[in-house]
Image: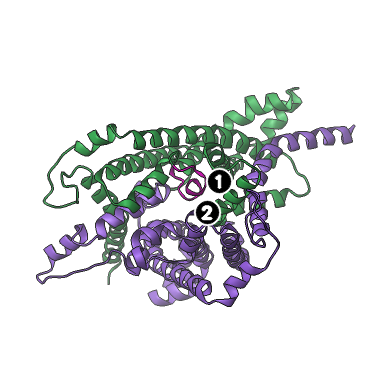
Chain colours: A purple, B green
Amino acid sequence: MATTIAGQDRLRAVTLLSPAYLWLTVAVFLPLSAMAFFSFLSDVPFGGRDWHVTLDNYRAFFETTTYATLLWKSLKLGLIVTAVSVIVGFPCAWVLAKVVKGRSREALFLLVILPFWSNSLVRIFSWAIVLRGNGVLDRAVNAVLPWDVKLNLMFSPTAIVIGLVHSYLPYVILTSYLALQAIDDSLIEAARSLGAKRRTILWRLILPLSAPGIIAGAVLIFVPVVGSFMEPRLLGGRLGTYYGTVIEDQFVAVFNWPLGAALSFILLAVVLAILAAASPILKRART
Amino acid sequence: MSNAFLAHLGRAYVGLILFFLYAPILVMAAMSFNASEFYQLPFSFTTDWYAKLAGNREILSAAWRSVWIAVIVTAIATSLGTAASIALFRYDFPGKRVLQVLLFPPIAIPWLITGTAMLIFFFGIGLGRGTPAVILGHVALALPYVIVVVSARLTSFDRTLEEAARSLGASPWQITRAVTVPWILPGIIAGGLFAFAVSFDQFVVSYFLSEPGDSTLPVLIYTSIRKGFTPEINAISTIIIAVSMGIMLLAARYSNFGGER
């Protein structure tokens, strides 16, 4: 009797689960496998084209320095954006978690998180309007400062960093806030009453305890920034060639899908390595 | 430095962050009401760009397409996601951890990789680009969010309620409909709003999967910006950002996301 009930339950579990997971299989896991397969082809295997299995696409990555340089450039961009976001975002999370209280905290927190859930493309576009030569920022700065300044930020690496920090800053504020909220105030009180200086409390108590949250936020920022292409395109102009934009080109301009697949797959390997390295910390951050 | 002074400094800092986050959006919104085509100041108020927008068939049809794709995606992702969440909550079975971990790749892998992989695979199976491909892709991106949000709501669900219903002779379907779903309804609504936002704001995956001339609104905006700015794009962008922020405010009301519980 017990076995038939278990069997029924298993049937019900499968019925409830399989639509969602079949969908994920068809739309995510099979495509990722197909991409891996494609990266070893000489040409696309449809439209009656000749194709054979080859390592040429990976050879292209390793034999010339072009792609590796661009990947490095994207990784550096990821590091800069992540570092700036953490340095700017952590104090903000601290104030929200430990200084502001009650309903105003709730409202402020929501205000910080809200832009993150709005359209990222539109937000990058809004920076293009603000940063363009003789644009709003130029005029505002010149109205304040007595001497003439030409900022010329548009189409520069700085513009890309500003746009990306704007896009991903809420991530690190969110994760740091959650970690900081979990720190018991009485711990900080105890340290203070034992005579610990502010700096000591920060370095020996608060940062170690909130490290999982900070690192979780950092990973959540770093990974998409390394794969970004729209932001460098719109804010970087001619200087906006990054690893992501080269992948985009293979699929929408050059139509070298196998090379694009190989480049994507190398990026995926880098991303998975980072996620795997951070996964013990990420797991701790979630609990 | 006194603590009160530091507290004021801290609040001022949060204010500065909010200024950084909102100022460009407000500038964009203001410029959509500015008469100059090249964003020249001084500012002179006009609603011309919105009037022009109302007559721009290309933008309007893309906007309409974005909306109904998001509605379909929301319906599919919410129902499949809720079913999966209930199963993950109710039953224990080997491999459950694996199923939970499998929800993370669609969230964690950059959309550039997921999007190009979908493009390759959908061409390989003969589906190609177009609206069905976009819907297929969006649902996959939205599903993990729905499952995470609904599962979070389920953790506060009292299992003994299901057992009580079962001991009173209710079938599993009756239990689900009359006990479980009403309890987790706020979670389902929040998950649905997340799904809508993921689809409505999605650019990267739509960009690779939509047919030229048959694109969603974000894709149309991207191609227009690359050709050159127009205040019409400002106007539609302002509307989009207002819509997506409104949706997220609603989602915040229905889920515990943000603030204290």
Please provide the residue range marked out in magenta.
Answer: B201-212
For the N terminus of chain A, give its image quadrant. top right
The answer to whether mark 2 and mark 1 are in CB contact below 8 A is yes
- The reply, left or right, for residue B52 in relation to residue B139 is left
Marker disc for residue A190? none
> Looking at the image, is mark 2 or mark 1 earlier in the sequence?
2
Q: Name the residue under label 2.
A: B111
For the C terminus of chain A, give its image quadrant. bottom right
Quick one: SS at disc 2? helix
Membership of B203 in magenta stretch: yes
- Which amino acid type is marked by label 1? Leu
- Which amino acid type is marked by label 2? Trp
For residue A60, what is the image quadrant? bottom right
- The reply, left or right, for residue A262 in relation to residue A101 is right
Membership of B1 in magenta stretch: no
For residue A100, what is the image quadrant? bottom left
On what subunit does the disc labeled 2 rest? Answer: B
Q: Which residue is drawn at 76% across and 22% down?
A: B169
Q: Name the residue under label 1.
A: B141
- The reply, left or right, for residue B62 in relation to residue A271 is left
Q: Residue at x 19, y 51 (%)?
A: B39
Foreground residue among B56 and A47: A47
For residue A151, what is the image quadrant? bottom left
Q: 10 Å neighbourhood of mark 2: few (<14), some, or many (≥20)?
A: some
Q: How far apart are marks 2 and 1 (CA)?
A: 9 Å
Foreground residue among B184 and A130: A130
Q: Position of residue A183 (x, y in %)?
A: 49, 62
On what subunit does the disc labeled 1 rest? Answer: B
Please, is residue B46 above or below residue A30 in the view?
above
Q: Nearer the viewer, mark 2 or mark 1?
A: 2
Q: Which residue is drawn at 39% across and 65% down?
A: A240
